[in-house]
Image: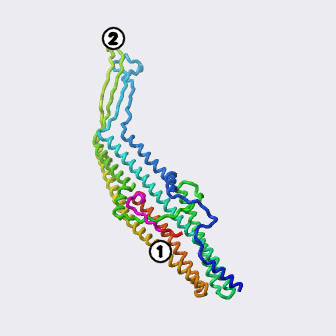
């Protein structure tokens, strides 16, 4: 009778305790916006992209500036036998000259446009990198959230399975159970521990990846990610596609490259015209008075202009062809990018709708039904109406459904982060987005 009484007490322990993180693990709650901001501030790859943009921006003034003027000093028509004497020959003089190269009209403007649009393309590449970095941080955070939820329900299930093992052993010892129940409960507990080890290792990997994105030591622990609501997107695919074309930095980068190619074509056309070189020389002379020559030694000057002869037509036609092919190449890349964006938005909306419906199905249908099934099995097991395997299966089904719920919620938010990266802006900044407060089961 004592054993039967003890058995009854243990069965009462089968009511599910509230799931949560283990008491010994107390991590601070992270702020997703703060983590994203830290990544955008500290990530070295992003800093390198920003420096590349500023480097090319510095080339704009270089491209629009004239070449430095040239100054010339020379001693002209000096006698070999008296190299430093200026009053022996009337052609001897000290000459000071100045020259300046002047490009043909419009070339400097075209060069400036080429450099300007090139720099703009790197600016938008930098902005695109920011979007990608924010997406990766969010995805890592939501994966950590799902793992923490999974670990919490595993901790709860391990306690219940431990009770199951004790109950199986006790029932077997009094002849009310079979040894197979003990083995089955122990096997499920071992499988649960194996899953726990795997999830903890996955969390460490995600922590290392997140710390890498934030550019900080990989062993810094990541706290718990707070619960969230699932926003229900009310934008149509067409509207989101228009938003992406308007806001996506990569599209703006390719548009800048098209403008650069057009400026290069204008520059190639200008190369068929010569550049000029203006020069001015001033000659300092000495007076000469001897038996053969009398020269007062007046100073003299000369002004000249020189220009190149653009005879290398093949070279300049090749420059034109280069700019033409560059325009065609970037234009096709832009078309391909827009096509990819349209596909990504369409596919992401489909996945979001699927995940949202799964979450609602789990929360309003499957999980409540699984809980009722488990409670019914528990009651029936107490009065020996069902066997132990039925009770164990009902509990494991409830565990699996809850895990799938958390995974679906995390996947929904990850798809949302991908959608934000695809359209080039935060979804919360769009005025027509409605937030549906989808309940998150703790």
Q: Position of residue 246 (x, y in %)?
A: 35, 56
Bounds of the magenta segment: 426-438
Q: Residue at x 61, y 62 (%)?
A: 26
Query: Per the image, is 146 magenta?
Result: no
Local crowd size for mark 2, using a 10 Å CA cut-off: few (<14), some (14–19), many (≥20): few
Q: Residue at x 36, y 58 (%)?
A: 243
Answer whether residue 304 is visible to the viewer in this image.
Answer: yes
Q: Is residue 248 depicted above or below 170 in this figure?
A: above
Instruction: Looking at the image, tell me whether mark 2 or mark 1 is earlier in sequence order.
Output: 2
Q: Residue at x 52, y 78 (%)?
A: 370
Colour scheme of the rendered structure: rainbow
Closest to the camera, between mark 2 and mark 1, is: 1
Distance (Cα) linking label 2 and label 1: 123 Å
Q: Is residue 416 left or right of residue 325?
A: right
Reading the image, the residue beneath label 1 is 364
Q: Residue at x 35, y 57 (%)?
A: 245
Q: Position of residue 46 (x, y in %)?
A: 48, 52
Local crowd size for mark 1, using a 10 Å CA cut-off: few (<14), some (14–19), many (≥20): few
Q: Position of residue 12 (x, y in %)?
A: 63, 79
The one nearer the camera, 182 or 439, is: 439
Identify the secondary structure beneath mark 1.
helix
Q: Which mark is residue 291?
A: 2
Q: Residue furthest right?
A: 2
The one nearer the camera, 211 or 304, is: 211
Magenta stretch secondary structure, dominant: loop
On-image quarter of the N terminus: bottom right
On-image quarter of the C terminus: bottom right
């Amino acid at each position: 009778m004592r054993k039967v009484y003890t058995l009854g007490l243990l069965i009462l322990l089968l009511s599910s305790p509230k799931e949560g993180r283990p008491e010994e693990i107390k991590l601070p709650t992270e702020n997703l916006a703060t983590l994203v901001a830290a990544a955008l501030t500290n990530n070295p790859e992003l800093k390198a992209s920003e420096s590349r943009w500023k480097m090319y921006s510095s080339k704009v003034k270089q491209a629009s500036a004239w070449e430095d003027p040239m100054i010339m000093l020379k001693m002209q028509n000096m006698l070999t036998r008296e190299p430093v004497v200026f009053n022996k020959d009337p052609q001897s003089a000290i000459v000071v000259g100045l020259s300046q190269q002047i490009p043909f009209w419009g070339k400097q403007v075209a060069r400036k446009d080429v450099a300007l649009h090139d720099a703009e393309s790197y600016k938008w590449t930098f902005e695109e990198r920011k979007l990608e970095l924010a997406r990766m941080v969010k995805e890592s955070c939501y994966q950590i959230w799902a793992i923490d939820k999974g670990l919490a329900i595993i901790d709860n299930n391990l306690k219940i399975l431990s009770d199951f093992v004790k109950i199986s052993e006790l029932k077997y010892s009094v002849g009310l159970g079979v040894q197979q129940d003990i083995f089955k409960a122990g096997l499920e507990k071992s499988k649960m521990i194996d899953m726990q080890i795997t999830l903890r290792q996955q969390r460490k990997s995600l922590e290392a990846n997140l710390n890498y994105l934030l550019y900080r030591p990989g062993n810094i622990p990541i706290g718990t990610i707070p619960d969230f609501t699932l926003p229900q997107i009310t934008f149509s695919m067409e509207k989101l596609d228009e938003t992406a074309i308007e806001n996506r930095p990569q599209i703006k980068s390719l548009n800048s490259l098209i403008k650069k190619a057009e400026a290069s074509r204008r520059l190639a056309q200008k190369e068929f015209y010569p550049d000029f070189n203006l020069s001015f020389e001033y000659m300092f002379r000495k007076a000469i008075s001897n038996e053969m020559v009398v020269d007062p030694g007046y100073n003299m000057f000369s002004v000249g202009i020189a220009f190149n002869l653009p005879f290398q037509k093949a070279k300049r036609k090749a420059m034109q062809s280069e700019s033409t092919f560059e325009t065609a190449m970037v234009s096709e890349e832009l078309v391909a990018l827009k096509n990819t964006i349209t596909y990504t938005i369409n596919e992401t909306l489909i996945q979001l709708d699927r995940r949202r419906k799964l979450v609602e199905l789990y929360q309003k249908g499957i999980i409540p039904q699984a809980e009722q099934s488990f409670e019914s099995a528990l009651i029936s097991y107490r009065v020996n109406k069902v066997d132990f395997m039925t009770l164990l299966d009902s509990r494991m089904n409830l565990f699996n459904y809850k895990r799938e719920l958390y995974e679906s919620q995390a996947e929904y938010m990850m798809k949302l982060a991908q959608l934000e990266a695809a359209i080039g802006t935060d979804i919360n900044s769009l005025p027509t987005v409605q937030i549906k407060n989808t309940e998150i089961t703790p």
